[in-house]
Amino acid sequence: MRLSLPDTFDVVLLQGEAECFPDQHVPGAAAKALADKFGWDPRAEEGSFLCIRVAPRTVRAWRDEPELTGGVIMRDGTWLE
C-alpha cells in the first residue's frame, strides 16, 4: 500500500504493509491511541468506518518540486541518517 500525506507541497510518501479493520474490530490499543490523540473513537459512531494500519517499509519526503530526486528517509523499515 502507498499513502501520500498531506498535500502536494510538503509530501510524505509511505509504502508498506497495510491491515484493514472494520470500526468494531480495531485492536483495543490502536483504538485508544486514536481516541487519545484525536479525541474521536470511530467505534462509538453510528456509521461504519474502516481503519487502516500501515507498517511503513519505505518513506520518502520532499518539499516542492526541486527536491523530487530521491528523498528516501526510510528503507526496508529502517530510518536512514
Image (cartoon, rainbow, N blue to C red):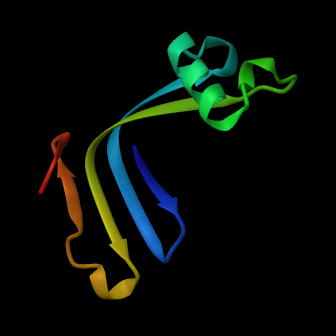
What residue is at 13 percent from the left and 53 percent from the top? 80
Residue 14 location (% of width, % of height): 36, 51
Residue 78 sits in quarter: top left
Residue 41 location (% of width, % of height): 72, 25
* Image quarter of the C terminus: bottom left
Residue 70 location (% of width, % of height): 20, 71
Height in image: 30 above or below 34?
Answer: above
What residue is at 77 percent from the left and 26 percent from the top? 48
Q: Nearer the viewer, residue 80 or 70?
A: 80
Height in image: 6 above or below 34?
Answer: below
Height in image: 52 above or below 6?
Answer: above
Q: Nearer the viewer, residue 44 or 32?
A: 32
What residue is at 87 percent from the left and 22 percent from the top? 46
Residue extending farthest left: 81
Apparent side of residue 70 relative to residue 65 in the rendered image (left or right): left
Height in image: 21 above or below 64?
Answer: above
Residue 66 location (% of width, % of height): 31, 88
* Image quarter of the N terminus: top left
